[in-house]
Image (tube, rainbow, N blue to C red):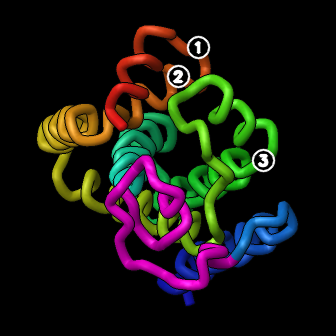
Amino acid sequence: MRKTLPWIAVVAVLAGTTYLLRSQGRLWVCSCDYVLLWSGDAWSSDNSQHLLDPYSFTHVLHGFVLCGLLALVVPRVPAVWRLWLAVSVEALWEVVENSEFVIRRYREETAALGYTGDTVLNSLADIVLCGIGFALADRLGFRLTAALFVLTEAVLAVWIRDGLILNIIMLIHPIEAVREWQAAGH
């Protein structure tokens, strides 16, 4: 039971998040009546509506960051419970990210002009990817994780003109020059 309890706690977080997202009016899957494993166009209406998309990589990066932060803040807590904490924080973010306030903020202040929020399927995949990022960072250690973080951010900046750091900046304190640069990419 001791080994399964953290995993039961993770499933409980996923179930609770599903309930909260549905309560917010989030659709289970895309209203387009089909489900894609991968939607590669960050500027299409399919973005955030299917299982995986270019922003999925930023959720892996969330896992990297949360792994490092939790190792610093609660170093004596077993890794599996730190994973549960990371998944819980990510789940909370998914609920907040899909609130009307944040959706409106994305539309008004970032290049995500047509953003309507995530589907439940996409949000759950994002949470799982955060957990994968956490586990990967826990195995790779700080140096390799930091290098992979920088590489991922660079690839996303070239590919979709966005990434985790740009996303945070533009959500909190938008910069017009960055918004113009992002908009020129699609």
Residue 11 is situated, as x and y percent measured from the top left of the image, at: 61, 79
Reading the image, the residue beneath label 3 is 99
Q: Which residue lies at the image location 87% right of the left edge and 67% below the top edge?
A: 23
Residue 43 is situated, as x and y percent measured from the top left of the image, at: 43, 47
| Labelled pair 1, 2 in contact (Cβ < 8 Å) | yes
Say few, some or many: other residues with alpha carbon within 10 Å of mark 2 (under 14 / 14 to 19 / 20 or more): many
User: Residue 77, can we see it?
Assistant: yes
Residue 73 located left or right of residue 52:
right
Q: Which residue lies at the image location 58% right of the left edge and 64% below the top edge?
A: 123
Give the camera-side residue of 171 and 91: 171
Inspect the image, locate mark 2, and give the three-letter code of the amino acid beneath it.
Met
Reading the image, the residue beneath label 2 is 170
Residue 69 is situated, as x and y percent measured from the top left of the image, at: 44, 37
N-terminal label among 1 and 3: 3
Q: Residue 24: within the magenta?
A: no
Q: Residue 36: within the magenta?
A: yes
Q: Quadrant of residue 95?
A: bottom right
What's the magenta region? 28-53
Residue 65 located left or right of residue 91:
left
Say few, some or many: other residues with alpha carbon within 10 Å of mark 1 (under 14 / 14 to 19 / 20 or more): few
CA separation in Å, label 3 and label 2:
17 Å
Residue 130 located left or right of residue 151:
right
Inspect the image, locate mark 3, and give the three-letter code of the amino acid beneath it.
Ser
The N terminus: image quadrant: bottom right
Reading the image, the residue beneath label 1 is 173
